[in-house]
């Protein structure tokens, strides 16, 4: 069996939509992606070469318009960050923020995060993975589209360094409970808290979250760390 045949297909956690993109975001995509983007390719990348330095690397999956992403990167210049986003508007907006803020420790990949982690990120190379407010796919028949699934969490755990972390956040209780169950099932991850985590001050409030909080929505954070040995279920 060749490598292509051996790769299992997966259900995408997103759908391609008709793009709603501003002229400025479109210009950023064209002009700035060659400067700050990493093209997808089905081969491992060397993170030190990408950033021209050796530093902890953290990936954010689904960076949206990049508000929280850019703030985290600017507040932590000692780390390298890679934002993975599929939608043109979000990628264009983040690239514009990178140029405007002169943020040199952040890169962008526009591709399916599952394929990026599977094909491009070497095992045991990441200090952390952020997944903030992924699509909850609230209808039961769509739950199979949720990003946080056992196979995906096992992949993330394999890419984390020992004591590396995965930090998830959602404002859907049903999805939060699903995340907690799936993360607890991974034998290489250990919950950093007895249940859900208190909201970390290092996770910036986005406009989306602020709007939800004003409407009385609650947010659940989960932080799990990679162990050096399998946990007993």
Image: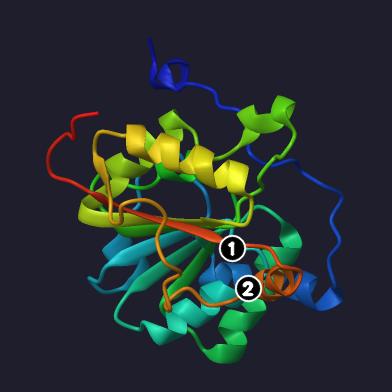
Q: Viewed as shown, does residue 24 lie left or right of 57?
A: right
Q: Position of residue 32 (x, y in %)?
A: 62, 74
Closest to the observer, 43 or 188: 188
**Rendered-image quadrant of the N terminus:** top left
The residue wearing badge 2 is: 94
Q: Quadrant of the C terminus?
A: top left
Between 218 and 41, the one lying in front of the other is: 218
Q: From what the image shows, is residue 27 above or below residue 192? A: below
Taking 57 as reference, is 191 above or below it?
A: above
What residue sits right under mark 1 in the picture? 63
- Residue, far left: 229
Q: Is residue 118 visible?
A: no
Tag 2's secondary structure? helix
Above or below: residue 204 compared with residue 163: below
- Say whether marks 1 and 2 touch (CB < 8 Å): yes
Q: Tell me the residue at 66%/70% (across/down).
A: 209
Neighbour tally class for label 2: few under 14, some 14-19, many 20 plus, Cα within 10 Å: many
* Residue pictured at 66% horizontal, 45% vertical: 136
Rendered image quadrant of residue 229: top left
Whole-percent x, y for residue 117 in the image? 42, 44
Sequence-wise first label, 1 or 2: 1
Per the rendering, the mark at residue 91 is: none
């Amino acid at each position: 069996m060749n490598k292509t045949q051996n790769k299992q297909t997966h259900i995408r956690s997103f759908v391609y939509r008709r793009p709603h993109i501003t002229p400025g975001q479109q210009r950023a995509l064209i002009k700035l992606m060659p400067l700050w983007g990493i093209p997808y390719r089905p081969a491992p990348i060397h993170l030190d070469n990408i950033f021209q330095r050796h530093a902890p690397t953290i990936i954010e999956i689904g960076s949206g318009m990049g508000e929280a992403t850019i703030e985290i990167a600017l507040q932590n210049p000692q780390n390298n960050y890679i934002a993975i986003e599929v939608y043109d508007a979000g990628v264009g907006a983040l690239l514009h923020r990178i140029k405007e803020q002169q943020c040199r420790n952040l890169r962008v990949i526009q591709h399916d995060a599952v394929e990026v982690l599977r094909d491009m990120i070497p095992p045991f190379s990441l200090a952390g993975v952020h997944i903030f407010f992924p699509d909850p796919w609230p209808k039961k028949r769509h739950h199979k589209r949720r990003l946080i699934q056992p196979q995906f969490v096992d992949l993330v755990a394999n890419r984390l360094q020992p004591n590396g972390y995965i930090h998830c956040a959602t404002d859907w209780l049903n999805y939060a409970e699903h995340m907690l169950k799936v993360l607890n099932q991974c034998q290489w991850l250990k919950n950093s808290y007895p249940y859900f985590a208190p909201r970390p001050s290092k996770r910036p409030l986005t406009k989306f979250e602020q709007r939800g909080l004003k409407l009385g929505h609650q947010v659940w954070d989960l932080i799990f760390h990679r162990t050096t040995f399998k946990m007993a279920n």
